[in-house]
Amino acid sequence: MTSQRPGGTVKLGQHEISRIGYGAMQLEQVDTAAATAVLRRAVELGINHVDTASFYGHTTVNQHIRAALHPYADDLVIVSKVGARRLEVPVRVRLGEVEAPVHLALAQRPEQLREQIHLDLTSLGLEQVPVVNLRRADHGPGLIAEGDQLVPLDDQLAELIALRNEGLIGAIGLSNISTEQLKQALPAGIVCVQNAYSLLDRSSEEQLQLCAANDITWIPYFPLGSAFDRIPSPTEHPAVQALATRLNTTPAAICLAWILAHGNHTALIPGTRSVDHLEENVRTADVELDEEALAELDAVVNA
């Protein structure tokens, strides 16, 4: 295993993680052998930050991680997410303008958060989950809370703090939150925020700066857009494609490199089920954006 961390490192709570990590959600769609190949190659490449959730295939992905990497290296940081649960039979729900079958239901109540943590501990074979992100559902993308799933943030934080005090989780993160919710949660000791953010979508810029001011790691999701949620991909922007040609790299690498260059407290968790694609994502670390390139990309949002 290499000691070099792709993209360098950033602090995630008490941990030092590679700025290019790995989001494991897509491993739900492959068998254990294929998942093992990707996960072990990620570790070989220096990645020590793996993002998962028990509701990815109802512990399927967690079980892949355990099969491939357990017993875990001391410096491997497994980050999970709570706020939803897996359904055996899909239900049709409206996501924005689209109605689609979904295998998920929200699980926002404090006792449900605790249940998900225990599911992570069992399926991953851990005594403590290093970091757990609370995924709020006040707005899209994805499911939106209603009825008994409308839970005050303070109630959820109180449960996560209790779990942290019991030693079952190491640190608390937040996902899909507003700026006001982040400010509200700061006293709880937040170590990371996962929100939708990309070269084209900088609506969370204020939060990114707030995270920087409070030593909180910013880990965007949908940095390359999302076909399912109809979120446009910045890889299709002419300025991105022109720069990729000039630097002899891919538009995706340009978009990811911009995020790393935009703030030194940022990290990435691109996901894939392919070893080749994994290696391509890691090569993002080799893309150097000079001041001229950064200025061109910074102007994209206003174009």
Image (spheres, helix red, strand yellow):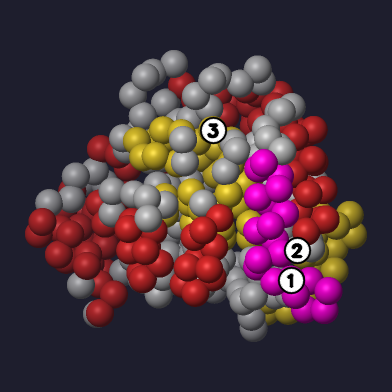
Q: Quadrant of the C terminus?
A: bottom left
The residue type indicated by label 1 comes to Val
Left/right of residue 178 with respect to residue 299 in the rendered view: right
81 part of magenta stretch: no
Q: Are marks 1 and 2 in contact (CB under 8 Å)?
A: yes
**Residue 281 at x, y = what percent?**
40, 41
Q: Earlier in the sequence, mark 3 or mark 1?
A: 3
**In the rendered image of this protein, does residue 298 appear above or below residue 193?**
below
Which residue was labeled with disc 2? 108
Q: Nearer the viewer, mark 1 or mark 2?
A: 1
**Residue 1 at x, y = what percent?**
44, 16
Which residue was labeled with disc 3? 77
**In the rendered image of this protein, does residue 131 appear above or below residue 138?**
above
**Residue 221 at x, y = what percent?**
49, 58
Q: Residues within 10 Å of mark 3 (few under 14, many from 20)?
A: many
Q: Earlier in the sequence, mark 2 or mark 3?
A: 3
Q: Residue furthest right?
A: 89
Residue at disc 1, secondary structure: loop
Residue at disc 3, secondary structure: strand
Give, as a single range, the part of the protein colored magenta: 146-165
Residue at disc 2, secondary structure: loop
Give the distance between the C-alpha atoms of the residues marked 3 and 1, in whole angstroms: 29 Å
Q: Residues within 10 Å of mark 2 (few under 14, many from 20)?
A: many
The residue type indicated by label 3 comes to Val
Residue at point 72% right, 54% down?
159
The residue type indicated by label 2 comes to Gln
Q: Quadrant of residue 167?
A: top right
**In the rendered image of this protein, does residue 180 appear above or below residue 62?**
below
151 part of magenta stretch: yes
